[in-house]
Image: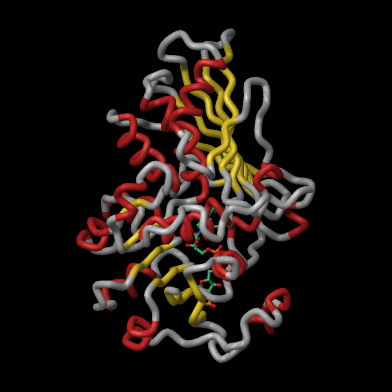
Amino acid sequence: MKKAAIIGGTGYGAIELIRLLQLHKEIKVEKIISHSQHGEAIASIYPHLTDFIEEPMHELEIEKLQEEVDIVFFATPAGVAKEILPQFTNPNLQCIDLSGDLRLSSQTEYETWYGKDAATQQLLDKAVYGLSELYAEEIKQANLISNPGCFPTSALLGLAPALEHQIMSPQGISIDGKTGISGAGRTPTAKTHFSETNENVTPYKIGQHQHIPEIEEYLSDKAKTPITVAFTTHLIPMTRGLICTMYGQLAKKATTEEVIEIYQSYYENNPFVRIREAGVFPATKDVYASNFCDIGIHVDERSNQIIIAAAIDNLVKGAAGQAIQNANLMNGWEETMGLHTIPIYP
Ligand SMILES: NC(=O)C1=CN([C@@H]2O[C@H](COP(=O)(O)OP(=O)(O)OC[C@H]3O[C@@H](n4cnc5c(N)ncnc54)[C@H](OP(=O)(O)O)[C@@H]3O)[C@@H](O)[C@H]2O)C=CC1
Ligand SMILES: CC(=O)N[C@@H](CCC(=O)OP(=O)(O)O)C(=O)O
């Protein structure tokens, strides 16, 4: 059994890690670290955790922590992991960062899109991008993972097969993203306030979203040609769930059934990606609280476009679930360990 610590204890990513790891046969949550509420029991903040975790949350003590645990999950905002990671000296410690700190390979790109100082180039070079299905072999060799953003998880899983198989043109791709409000984390703002979000749909960060360079970097890597995308995000009045509907020109003649066959074979060894049959599209509820990414495909002969929708749960496949999937890959465990649950429905 490996011992894990979670940093950022009172956030949504952290409590989702706690929930999922409760079912894991090889990982025990040893320490929950909270910079704001150490000394408190997590159940005093989240009563749904009553009787599951009794030990109070801890303050971060880097020296002690790296001797006490084998795996560290960073469920912290951008800017935190890149400061703590260089202070770890234990080469065997496995670290998985849920934030955007290590996802972009270029320091300049990070500083442009996140508006913060970047991690050192050495740290960026060491981190492996943890999109489990697309980089499994690299993840198996890594001990530092940059867990993907929620939108990039959906967009990359939805678009990579079409671009790798050159059935979609690399030019003119549009991605229309929609997310539930838990994607913004636990701290409320004027924009995430109930009376602003209820019965409302709001486009946000248009042309400025920090996930644009992440999607472009890894799509370009898979397509082996530079890709630029038009990406929009919308806040939807629901707690969880995320769906990207994506549009691209057909690069060669193909039917819906033929494209579906390509996707089915691309993901045949990936238990968390489910491809819908022709005429059926996924909904966010189909993957609620699960690690699945469900994909629907339609070839629109009238406009010569492929339309692809990819639905995930932002907190599971988009964050904590994928982090655990990566820990499974890094340790040679069954990829589905602790994660193969039926989505909650309705
Ligand atoms: N929510 C989502 O759907 C997704 C989130 N992510 C990313 O995962 C990370 C965690 O997200 P989420 O849990 O939603 O965010 P939250 O805002 O809910 O939680 C983040 C937690 O980090 C801790 N924290 C805040 N500021 C600091 C600081 N300056 N130094 C150290 N710790 C701090 C706090 O916990 P404490 O005070 O207890 O330490 C806080 O509760 C973020 O980087 C986010 O972008 C990625 C994909 C999806
Ligand atoms: C609703 C909402 O605000 N969602 C966030 C997604 C958070 C996330 O995954 O972003 P990072 O890990 O890259 O910070 C957003 O669109 O920025």
Say above or below: 221 vs 101.
above
Residue 95 spot, x, y in % from top left: 36, 67
Which residue occupies the extreme left position in the image?
Answer: 122
Q: Picture coordinates of residue 132 (x, y %)?
A: 42, 48
**Would residue 115 be seen by someone viewing this image from the given angle?**
no
Q: How did the renderer colour the structure?
A: secondary structure
Give the image location of residue 289, x and y in percent: 65, 54
Q: Is residue 223 left or right of residue 26?
A: left
Tally of marks? 0
Q: Is residue 171 above or below residue 124?
A: above
Q: Is residue 316 left or right of residue 195?
A: left
The residue positioned 42% from the left and 10% from the top of the image is 252
Q: Looking at the image, which residue sits at the far bottom?
A: 39
Q: Quadrant of the N terminus?
A: bottom left
Q: Is residue 82 left or right of residue 41?
A: left
117 in relation to 68, above or below: above
The answer to which image quadrant residue 234 occupies is top right
Residue 260 located left or right of residue 201: left
Residue at left 49%, top 11%? 254
Q: Residue at x 68, y 50 (%)?
A: 343
| Residue 186 appears in the figure | yes
Q: Position of residue 218 (x, y in %)?
A: 35, 40
Q: Nearer the viewer, residue 232 or 66?
A: 66
Please report the residue visible at 38 percent of the width from the left and 87 percent of the height from the top. Answer: 61
> Which quadrant of the structure image shows residue 182?
bottom right
Q: Judge by depth and name the residue closer to the eye, 172 or 150.
A: 150
Q: Quadrant of residue 84?
A: bottom left
